[in-house]
Amino acid sequence: MFNKTIQMFIFEGNPNGKIMCELSNWNGRVYKIARSELNTFSNRNDANNTGIYFLFGKNESNKETIYIGEAERVSERLKQHLNDTDYWNDCIAVISKDNLLNKAHVKFLEHKFYKQAVESGRFEIINSTIPTLSSVSEYDEAMLEKFISNAKLLVNTLGYKAFESISLNSNNTNSDTSLFHINAARGANATGYTVSDGFVVKKDSVIAESTTPSMSDNLKRLRQNLIDDGIIDSLNKFTKDYIFTSPSLAAAVVMGRNANGRTEWKTSDGVTIKQIEESQN
């Protein structure tokens, strides 16, 4: 893996408005655009290049959502989404600076990004249909796979991890020295590991059968949402690896009570996350 150099231009010094990102030795360009900034974005010379785009928002359960689309004229297509119900706030558009992408290329990219978002499982995908995979030459496929890799890096840098595997930045997640466990009251029995942006509870981990009266309403609601979404099944088991934003959220859901994850999650030798963090400082 080589080091990368990223150029980032923040328009008018407002990080919540428009941001342009480029990667050295790559002909792609990534824009982050607030919904309210679409009209000013459309004034740029490359705004109507052919490309793909992602619309980000949150649903009623506060889960992050994504819509994945493609367009031969990106800005015109994005303006059409202003007529949609208010399910998104921010947009990322990915184009080539020399406008060499064609319709087959962006259909290929749309399908690939959709599949990676599904595999990641981090965001709820709100596309009503699965994008079709266009046929491209071997040369174009190799070029587009590289395009995807670079675009993902910049999208991730901008704070959207919709296409990143939850275990991508973990270290040896099958090793006893990097796994943490909780065995607690009311049947809780879970295993997980830390990642760069949170804590992953592994598939088949079991949560407590009930919650304590003192557990906060927000945590109870999060726990119930995971059950309603099928992430936790009727046997109180996780149906897949699931990432939480912190070890404490993960511990609370597993144990059915308020919890400090940095002291509750322990290795097979009884070492807590807190102890490991303190030993590294």
Image (spheres, rainbow, N blue to C red):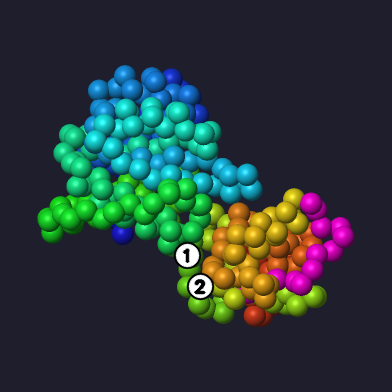
Q: Residue at x 39, y 20 (%)?
A: 39
Task: Using the rendered view, name the quadrant where residue 73 is placed.
Answer: top left
Q: Quadrant of the N terminus?
A: bottom left
Label of residue 167 in the image: 1
Which quadrant does the C terminus fall into? bottom right
Residue 49 appears anywhere in the view:
yes
Mark 2, residues whose alpha carbon is within 10 Å: few (<14), some, or many (≥20)? some
Instruction: Report the magenta stretch's main SS.
Output: loop
Amino acid under disc 2:
Thr
Q: Position of residue 93 (x, y in %)?
A: 35, 37
Nearest the viewer among 31 and 26 is 31
| Pointer 2 with pointer 1, Cβ within 8 A | yes
Q: List x then y, in percent, for residue 29.
A: 29, 37
Residue 158 is covered by the magenta coloring: no
| Mark-to-mark CA distance, 2 and 1 | 8 Å
Answer few, some or many: residues within 10 Å of disc 1's Cα (few below 14, many 20 plus, some between 14 and 19).
Answer: some
User: How far across and how far down the image is residue 95, in percent?
Assistant: 27, 37
Residue at which label 2 appears: 173
